[in-house]
Each structure stands twice: as structure tokens, then as C-alpha cells.
Image (cartoon, rainbow, N blue to C red):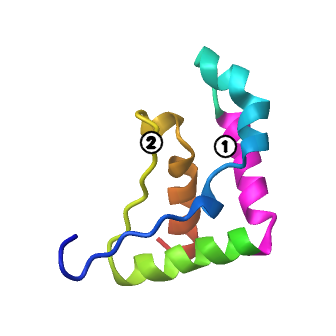
Amino acid sequence: MAEGLFDVWLPAVAPSAALLARFRPRIASGADLAPLFAAYERELLGSADGRQLVELLAVLARRMPVGLGCYCEDEGRCHRTRLRRLVERAAGA
């Protein structure tokens, strides 16, 4: 890792296994994932831990570049797109 950079794994900002299981047929079929992303946002922001992690990422994003990674190949069909919007909104971007 380059000097001044760090890498942190935050599984708490990932969709829960139950949420993914509920939407698995939609994910597998290539259907529109807007309902999944809306449910993910409700799940994440519905917990104090989730809200605090979004705020932490927003604080960091105000001070330095922040990258969000995942194993999904298509960012447009990945929760990190919604997470990025939540962080940007919290950061005032």
C-alpha cells in the first residue's frame, strides 16, 4: 500500500445476507435493481451503525479521496453505487 493510503474492509455497509437472498431471483435475471437498492438504503440508514458509517465515510471524503470497492463486476448493478450517493449526500457534495 502506498504511503498515506489505507485500506479498510467495512462489511457493515454491505447488504445483509437476508436482503440479498430476498432479491436473488431479480439479481440473477438481470431485472431492474432499483427495488433492491431502495431496500438496501432503508436497511443501511435504518440502523445507527449504518448511519454512523455513512457519516464516517462522508467525513473522510471531505478530506481525502475515498474509493468504494466490491466484488461486483458492474458498478451499475452494485450496492456501492447507492452507497456512493449516500456518502456524497452526507458529505454535502
Write down the residue under mark 2.
71
Residue at 72% in and 43% down: 17
Q: Residues within 10 Å of mark 2 (few under 14, many from 20)?
A: few
Q: Is residue 38 magenta?
A: yes
Residue at 74% in and 30% down: 23
Question: Which label number is shown at residue 74?
Answer: none
Q: Amino acid at mark 1?
A: Phe
Q: Which residues are magenta?
A: 34-48
Q: Main secondary structure of the magenta part?
A: helix
Q: Amino acid at mark 2?
A: Tyr
Q: Residue furthest top?
A: 29
The kind of secondary structure element at disc 1 is: helix
Write down the residue under mark 1.
37
Percent position of residue 40, x then y: 71, 49
Which of disc 1 and disc 2 is earlier in sequence? 1
The kind of secondary structure element at disc 2 is: loop
Count the numbered circles shown: 2
Residue 24, compared with residue 50, is above or below; it is above
Percent position of residue 53, x then y: 62, 73
Question: In front of the other: label 2 or label 1?
Answer: 2
Q: Residues within 10 Å of mark 1 (few under 14, many from 20)?
A: some
